[in-house]
């Protein structure tokens, strides 16, 4: 058949020519159309695990980019790229967060200062936290090995049922501890893998739920999951859980250093942020221009809090700010100094008649910073003043979150928030400045 430009380029002819070439190639299997090579079953299982993980992810999430699977134009060849740049990028349509599945490589920013490590699959989740994108990484390593737990063996005495080999579980511990991230500037190393799991061939998922290496996932975030063509539900369920996790939940899945709980308890317990109301746009403009904030001393219910207030946040109400985009918390500043003065001594803002002798607190602010994502009112407001921690303020999307007092309450809120809009109930609805959150639920 003579090949002309008409056959190669003209509409209609081009499609016929393409079908002709496919048929011709199909009749020449002895050539390079299917370049087959002998591969052991373990290698094929590794390939299948990677492809199946992508299939499970593709059912719920949008594939944004892939450069792992490549096609050779000389025929139909599929190769799996093992370079650090090879990745499958997905996006969660619910919240826009992206995550990446690497094949047989670790992300470029991760290092192994001692010995090289190459897990089969690394899932990197990017979650929004305090205005930043933080990464949480998990190893899914394919191991085509199953201990049958024959009676009389030490494995049967320990676990009473088939499961992954102990050496493979030890490898997961090594991956989690050996792969680290080096901070830019400081040069300090941090553990970057939050969990590591063996994928192994076993069909009975229900029975395996009682295995110690399945329960260890909930305890240490290290363990094993059965993975076969008809046994994928545990892996699918686990993927959905870690992708849905809030940053707090993702962090808690890993084994934390001793003392972490006490550290975060102190972070939440110290109410070092004063969230105060403002009388209108004029007060906000004057406060920002002169780097200060003032309020009546009597509004500070616990005057001892003055010594621990490190930040001021101004809350703009619906009543004073007509434009909804201007309500909520837009400005936060670090306190440089504070003084108790008579109202008449605060010259930046004229005082109302009759308040000249009242005691006020004047906070000097180092610099007011405008939040890129304001904390919205969300159906609530602040009458006079509210106290919260900087840790919570940095992560809040609406005012109700500032009233959370414990790590458990914060985690519950953020878990529910990732599933949709959240409504809170206070124990004193009529006193919004003093009310505590007693119920958090999705609406």
Image (cartoon, rainbow, N blue to C red):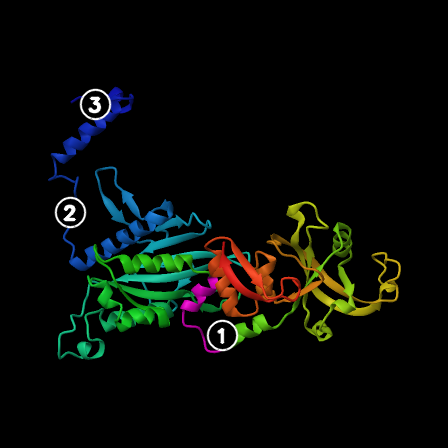
Q: Position of residue 90 (x, y in %)?
A: 39, 49
Which label's residue is closer to the chain start, 3 or 1? 3
Q: Is residue 185 left or right of residue 432?
A: left
Q: Is residue 424 left or right of residue 194?
A: right
Instruction: Name the element at disc 3.
Output: loop
Q: Quadrant of residue 419?
A: bottom left
The answer to which of 429 and 291 lies nearer the viewer is 429
Question: Taking 152 as reference, is 90 above or below it?
Answer: above
Q: Residue 37: which numbered mark, if any?
A: none
Instruction: Name the element at disc 2.
Output: loop
Mark 1, residue position:
260
Quick one: label 1, few (<14), some, or many (20+) residues within 10 Å?
few
Pointers 3 and 2 in contact (C-beta within 8 Å): no
The reply to whether the magenta stretch includes residue 179 is: no
Quick one: label 3, few (<14), some, or many (20+) residues within 10 Å?
few
Q: Residue at x 18, y 76 (%)?
A: 156
Pointers 2 and 1 in contact (C-beta within 8 Å): no
Q: Position of residue 347 (x, y in %)?
A: 86, 59
Quick one: label 2, few (<14), some, or many (20+) residues within 10 Å?
few
Mark 2, residue position:
36
The quadrant in which the N terminus is found is: top left
Q: Main secondary structure of the magenta part?
A: helix
- Number of the front mark, 3 or 1: 1
Which label's residue is closer to the chain start, 3 or 2? 3
Q: Which residues are magenta?
A: 247-261
Mark 3, residue position:
3
Question: Taking 143 as reference, is 325 above or below it?
Answer: above
Q: What is the CA distance from the residue labelled 2 to the residue labelled 1?
A: 53 Å
Q: Position of residue 17 (x, y in %)?
A: 21, 26
Q: Position of residue 232 (x, y in %)?
A: 26, 57
- Number of the front mark, 2 or 1: 1
């Amino acid at each position: 058949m003579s090949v002309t430009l008409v056959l190669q380029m003209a509409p209609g002819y081009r499609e016929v020519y393409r079908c002709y070439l496919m048929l011709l190639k199909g009749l020449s299997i002895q050539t390079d159309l299917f370049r087959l090579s002998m591969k052991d079953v373990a290698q094929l299982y590794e390939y299948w695990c990677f492809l199946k993980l992508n299939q499970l992810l593709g059912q719920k999430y949008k594939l944004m980019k892939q450069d792992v699977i490549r096609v050779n134009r000389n025929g139909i060849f599929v190769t799996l790229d093992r370079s650090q740049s090879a990745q499958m990028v997905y996006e969660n349509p619910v919240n826009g967060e992206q995550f990446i599945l690497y094949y047989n490589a670790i992300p470029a920013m991760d290092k192994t200062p001692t010995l090289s490590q190459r897990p089969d699959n690394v899932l990197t989740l990017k979650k929004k936290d305090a205005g930043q994108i933080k990464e949480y990484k998990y190893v899914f390593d394919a191991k085509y090995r199953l201990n049958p737990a024959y009676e009389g063996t030490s494995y049967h005495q320990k676990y009473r049922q088939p499961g992954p080999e102990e050496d493979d579980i030890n490898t997961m511990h090594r991956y989690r501890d050996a792969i680290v991230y080096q901070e830019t500037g400081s040069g300090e190393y941090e553990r970057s893998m939050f969990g590591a799991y063996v994928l192994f061939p076993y069909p009975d998922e229900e029975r395996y739920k009682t295995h110690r290496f399945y329960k260890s996932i909930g305890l240490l975030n290290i363990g094993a999951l059965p993975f076969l063509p008809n046994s994928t539900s545990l892996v699918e369920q686990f993927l959905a859980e870690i992708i849905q996790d809030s940053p707090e939940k993702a962090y808690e899945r890993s084994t934390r250093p001793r003392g972490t709980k006490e550290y975060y308890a102190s972070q939440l317990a110290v109410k070092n942020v004063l969230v105060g109301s403002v009388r209108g746009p004029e007060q906000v403009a004057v406060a920002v221009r002169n780097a200060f904030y003032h309020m009546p001393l009597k509004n500070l219910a616990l005057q001892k809090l003055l010594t621990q207030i490190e930040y001021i946040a101004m809350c703009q109400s619906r009543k004073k700010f007509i434009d909804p985009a201007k309500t909520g918390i837009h400005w936060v500043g670090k306190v440089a100094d504070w003084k108790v003065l008579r109202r008449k001594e605060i010259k930046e803002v004229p005082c109302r008649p009759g308040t000249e002798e009242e005691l006020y607190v004047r906070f000097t602010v180092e610099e007011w910073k405008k939040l890129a994502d304001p904390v919205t009112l969300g159906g609530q407001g602040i009458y006079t003043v509210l106290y919260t921690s900087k840790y919570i303020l940095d992560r809040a999307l609406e005012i109700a979150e500032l009233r959370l007092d414990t790590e458990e309450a914060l985690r519950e809120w953020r878990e529910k928030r990732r599933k949709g809009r959240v409504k809170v109930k206070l124990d004193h609805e009529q006193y919004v400045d003093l009310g505590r959150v007693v119920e958090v639920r999705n609406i």
